[in-house]
């Protein structure tokens, strides 16, 4: 293929997977790849850098460009949760990209990448609810304010972990009192492979705490038929909305909802969207692919950040796991 005038690379680094895309300056994705977990808080600094570099290398290979063309890369933007001073170090950043790329990667919060996956606006708000939960105000590349995101022990109210723990607690209480199990609790026992109270407790304590997030979908699935699931869902909606409303969003700036709890169809996602649209004069949007949000920031750094390019970039379907 003919050499493009310039390229940007976006990467989205999570606790379960790493994704990377190579884009030309028009916003067209030339290559994309995914790899294993790459968050340095989970895997360590060196393995993180190796995973990011490997995934970028795989994405590059899918462009059809020779490695010698890496000099065309004008920017690399990496969206990362829980960055630290160590991840800002030149040693880590250089190790995170193939040797042929001369530019130093730019780190941004994964919240910023999620926000930019949905809108080209330079300012706005984002609410994320996946395993954890956090809200923030985005200004340019920076997260200028944040709420919650304190982790399972101290916060993450309304998150997948919070939902899963609430469902387990409801199930344990019913078992202790010898009450009939509702549809949510019956499904939870089956999913956990437990026959009763003691086995469920043992199963939960034999896994990392965030393992409980796997039960979150059961709450949404049974909210229409199980009063306990409906009650948990309603409380999650209240908590998530309270988290983002505590930022006192400025009128008319976009609010982007991200994370599986808020983007997969269901009573919690629907109720959050409805309530926030009712209470705020802000457009409420849903996040796309965080890796494309990171690439968009790279385009914006090259003064290639038009709304038309943003639409072209984020509306591309990535065939990635």
Image (spheres, rainbow, N blue to C red):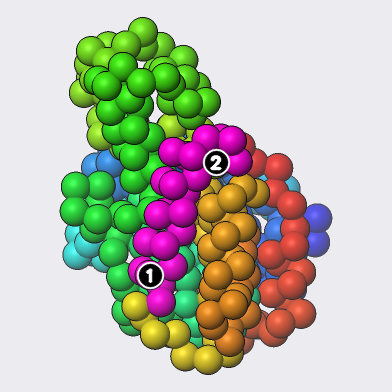
In this view, the residue in front, 101 or 32, is: 32
Assign the magenta stretch its main secondary structure.
Answer: helix
Q: Residue furthest bottom?
A: 251
- Image quadrant where residue 47 sits: top left
- In what element is the residue under mark 1? helix
Label 2: how many Cα within 10 Å (few below 14, some 14–19, many 20+): many
Give me the residue at 38% from left, 70% from top: 242
Q: Residue furthest top?
A: 195
Give me the residue at 58% from left, 83% from top: 282
Image coordinates of residue 143 in percent, x first then y, are 36, 76
Residue 168 falls left or right of residue 140: left
Q: Which mark is residue 223?
A: 2
Image coordinates of residue 93 in percent, x first then y, are 33, 60
Residue 284 falls left or right of residue 134: right
Closer to the chain start, of discs 2 and 1, is 2
Check contact, mark 2 vs mark 1: CB within 8 A. no
Q: Is residue 273 visible?
A: yes
Give me the residue at 71% from left, 66% from top: 313
Q: Which mark is residue 242?
A: 1
Q: Which mark is residue 279?
A: none
Image coordinates of residue 184 in percent, x first then y, are 48, 29
- Image quadrant where residue 15 sits: top left
The span from disc 2 to disc 1 (Cα, nearest Å) is 21 Å
In this view, the residue in front, 48 or 256, is: 256
Image coordinates of residue 36 in percent, x first then y, are 45, 36
Residue 44 falls left or right of residue 19: left
The correct choice, above or below, for 68 with respect to 57 in the image is below
Q: Residue furthest right?
A: 1
Q: Does the stretch in magenta take in 58? A: no
Q: Which region is colored magenta?
A: 221-245
Label 1: how many Cα within 10 Å (few below 14, some 14–19, many 20+): some
């Amino acid at each position: 293929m003919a050499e493009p005038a310039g390229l940007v690379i976006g990467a989205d680094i999570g606790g379960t997977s790493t994704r990377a895309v190579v884009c030309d300056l028009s916003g067209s994705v030339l290559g994309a790849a995914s790899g294993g977990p790459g968050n340095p808080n989970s895997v360590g600094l060196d393995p993180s850098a190796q995973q990011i570099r490997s995934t970028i290398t795989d994405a590059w290979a899918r462009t059809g460009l020779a490695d010698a063309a890496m000099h065309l890369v004008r920017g690399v933007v990496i969206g990362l949760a829980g960055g630290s001073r160590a991840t800002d170090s030149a040693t880590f950043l250089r190790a995170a990209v193939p040797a042929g790329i001369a530019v130093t990667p730019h780190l941004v919060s994964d919240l910023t990448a999620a926000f930019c996956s949905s809108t080209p606006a330079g300012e706005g708000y984002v609410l994320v609810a996946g395993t954890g939960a956090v809200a923030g105000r985005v200004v340019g590349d920076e997260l200028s304010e944040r709420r919650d995101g304190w982790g399972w022990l101290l916060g993450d109210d309304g998150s997948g972990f919070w939902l899963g723990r609430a469902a387990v607690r409801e199930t344990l209480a019913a078992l202790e009192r010898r009450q009939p199990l509702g549809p949510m609790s019956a499904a939870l026992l089956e999913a956990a492979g437990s026959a009763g109270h003691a086995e469920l407790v043992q199963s939960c304590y034999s896994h990392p705490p965030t393992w409980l997030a796997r039960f979150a979908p059961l709450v949404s699935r049974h909210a229409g038929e199980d009063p306990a699931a409906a009650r948990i869902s309603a409380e999650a909606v209240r908590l998530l909305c309270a988290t983002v409303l505590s930022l006192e969003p400025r009128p008319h700036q976009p609010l982007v909802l991200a994370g599986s709890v808020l983007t997969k169809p269901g009573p919690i996602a629907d109720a959050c969207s409805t309530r926030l649209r009712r209470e705020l004069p802000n457009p409420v949007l849903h996040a796309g692919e965080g890796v494309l949000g990171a690439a968009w920031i790279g385009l914006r750094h090259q003064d290639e950040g038009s709304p038309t390019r943003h639409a072209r970039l984020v509306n591309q379907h990535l065939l990635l796991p």
